[in-house]
Image (cartoon, rainbow, N blue to C red):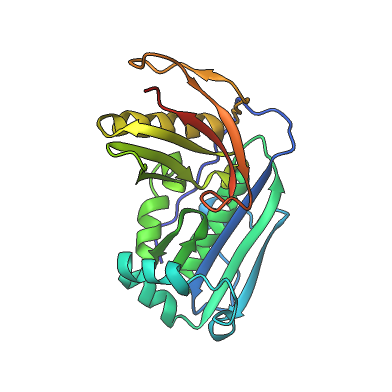
Amino acid sequence: MSPTMSLPAWARPHWQPNDEEILLQFYVFGSFEAVRVPSQDYGSPGLPEGITSTNHHHHELRAWEGYPLGGSMGKLFKEEAPEAYRAAVDAPQVLVVRGRLPDQPDTGYLRDVMGVIAGLLDIGGVAVLDPQIVSLFDADGWRRRYLVPDGAPIRSHLLILRDAESEPGRSWIHTRGMRKFGRPDFSVRDVPDAQVNLAGSLCERLVELEVLGGRFQDGQQVEIPGLPEDLVARLGGGPEHPDFNNSFVEFRWPV
């Protein structure tokens, strides 16, 4: 069992009532003891209303069309996280934690869910899969990422990715995971390769603003020191978008 600690919840000072929706989904693999999940050791009273946990025999889950350890995603995990992949594949049980919530004025809901996951790892969990950031962790790896003094940084709950654009020498910087906070992801197109670090830092600042409750309007201008002109926000996407499974705010880097 790991040393316990209370996980924090961030206030969202920029939050205002709206119709956004939070989506959470995690898979916890293991062989679980038939005891109460010790989530209170991590400051969590249990799963919030709207989030459920269902226990499955792993052999039944393999028949699902969206089985998370199969297909191209399973191949990715096997290559990038072989120890976690083997632990997950060999586990006899899978707990699926998922649900939707109306947008919230603080992130206590995420603290409570993460506290439950931490408790599950203390009673037989061996691996955690977070499909929203396409990441699979063994138990120790998950604890190192999220059970840290004063809480894991916002960045730990997200991915910031870089892909090549069709034009040589330019990159696409984009995020995944903002549905955990009921907010759009970010897309920054046509970034010169020499400025990808600047664009990555910009994405970190933008996601922090949204996690703390901020929202962007279509056509909103964002001033970036060192660039010849402001970036202009364009809203797009939706839950079925193949790159984000989410809405997004897109900016194009000035030529």
30 or 222: which is nearer to us?
222
**Quadrant of image for the C terminus:** top left
Residue 44 shown left or right of residue 201 in the figure: right
Q: Residue at x 59, y 50 (%)?
A: 241
Q: Position of residue 79 (x, y in %)?
A: 31, 68
Q: Residue at x 54, y 75 (%)?
A: 94
Residue 24 shown left or right of residue 128 in the figure: right
Q: Position of residue 134 (x, y in %)?
A: 45, 58
Q: Position of residue 159 (x, y in %)?
A: 42, 47
Residue 48 shown left or right of residue 242 in the figure: right
48 or 122: which is nearer to us?
48
Number of numbered labels in the structure image: 0
Residue 153 appears anywhere in the view = no
Displayed quadrant of residue 10: top right
Q: Position of residue 102 (x, y in %)?
A: 72, 44
Residue 134 appears anywhere in the view = yes
221 or 100: which is nearer to us?
221
**Quadrant of image for the N terminus:** bottom left
Q: Is residue 235 above or below residue 62?
A: above
Determine the residue located farthest toward the front in the rendered image: 167
Determine the residue located farthest toward the bottom in the rendered image: 59
254 or 83: which is nearer to us?
254
Q: Is residue 176 above or below residue 27?
A: above
